[in-house]
Image (cartoon, rainbow, N blue to C red):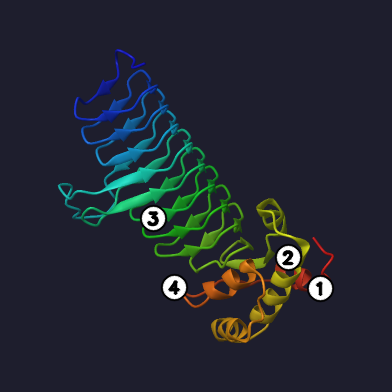
């Protein structure tokens, strides 16, 4: 079902059961999966690959050129969007700066109005970006994480799985898995609600709390995490994930702020 006023290139690949609204634009080289819905005035540029049942709301631009000076727009690159992901009004997804490279959005993500994912980012499955959240280039966001409204993330930053970032936060350092973070890189504790939604048992949460206190109670968090991992201090998969995160990356790691003092006083029954 393609509205008569939509502009769909004959060189675009359009699957079955696709709905394309009034004034929508689909450029040559775009691939639209089965069951996708492109609402009125949405724009899908060449190099975009949408898996099945992706929904693109008005005024989104998928696979637009990266916002950088002297970019060669003849370079072949694109954006991949996973199945069932929803892009609300005004979302912008920029294509990669690398030859044959990809900006990647996973499956079942929800990108709210006016959020932005810059070139070469990799966003895993089930990530939510609230209104106006901004990812600069080359960021990584782990599965199940949530970025609050207006949160801004510096380029090359890594965010782990099931991280909760508060609204209007400024993120310039890496955020290990399973944390609550707000303000400017200020860690306040574990995302216990997110862990429960992940299906983690009480034993996993207890272990992660102990590892959190050990690592962040040390002057050198990377060295302490490596030591804990080598000692086998983590017996669960989530515990090992948490510790291993510190070994990778080139940026600094976010540290606890004032809010974490209250968290540190909680016993294992807290939260």
Secondary structure, mark 2, is: helix
Q: CA distance from mark 4 to mark 2?
A: 25 Å
Q: Which circle's residue, 2 or 1, is located before the other in the chain? A: 2
Which residue is tagged 4?
249
Helix or strand or loop: what does disc 3 sit on?
loop
Q: Mark 3 or 1 closer to N-term?
A: 3
Residue beneath disc 1: 265
Query: Disc 4 on helix, strand or loop?
Result: loop
| Residue 261 image point, x, y percent | 75, 73
Q: Position of residue 106 (x, y in %)?
A: 45, 47
Task: State the image coordinates of residue 140 (x, y, percent, origin top left).
Answer: 44, 59
Above or below, 28 relative to 92: above
Q: Mark 2 highlights which residue?
A: 205
Image quarter hosting the C terminus:
bottom right
Calculate the distance from the C-alpha at mark 4 to the C-alpha at mark 3. 15 Å
Please tell me which residue is depicted at 40% across the width and 21% down the height of the picture: 17
Mark 3 = which residue?
A: 121
* Front residue of this view, candidates 142 and 93: 142
- Label 1 element class: loop
Q: Nearer the viewer, mark 3 or mark 2?
A: 2
């Amino acid at each position: 079902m393609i509205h008569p006023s939509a502009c769909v290139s004959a060189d675009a690949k359009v699957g079955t059961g696709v709905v394309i609204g009034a004034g929508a634009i689909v450029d040559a080289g775009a691939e639209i999966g089965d069951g996708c819905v492109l609402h009125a005035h949405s724009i899908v540029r060449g190099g975009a690959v949408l898996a099945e049942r992706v929904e693109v709301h008005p005024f989104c631009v998928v696979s637009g050129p990266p916002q950088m000076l002297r970019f060669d727009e003849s370079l072949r690159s694109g954006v991949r969007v996973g199945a069932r992901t929803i892009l609300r009004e005004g979302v912008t997804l920029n294509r990669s700066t690398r030859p044959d490279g990809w900006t990647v959005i996973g499956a079942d993500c929800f990108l709210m109005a006016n959020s932005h994912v810059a070139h070469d980012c990799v966003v895993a499955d089930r990530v939510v970006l609230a209104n106006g959240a901004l990812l600069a280039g080359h960021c990584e966001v782990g599965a199940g994480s949530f970025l609050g409204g207006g949160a801004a993330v510096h380029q090359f930053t890594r965010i782990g799985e099931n991280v909760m970032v508060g609204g209007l936060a400024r993120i310039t350092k890496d955020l290990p898995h399973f944390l609550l973070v707000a303000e400017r890189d200020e860690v306040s504790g574990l995302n216990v609600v997110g862990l429960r939604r992940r299906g983690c048992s009480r034993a996993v949460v207890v272990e992660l709390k102990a590892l959190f206190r050990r690592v962040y109670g040390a002057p050198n968090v990377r060295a302490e995490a490596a030591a804990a991992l080598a000692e086998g201090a983590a017996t669960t998969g989530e515990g090992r994930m948490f510790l291993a995160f510190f070994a990778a990356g080139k940026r600094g790691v976010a540290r606890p702020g004032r809010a974490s003092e209250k968290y540190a006083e909680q016993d294992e029954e807290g939260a």
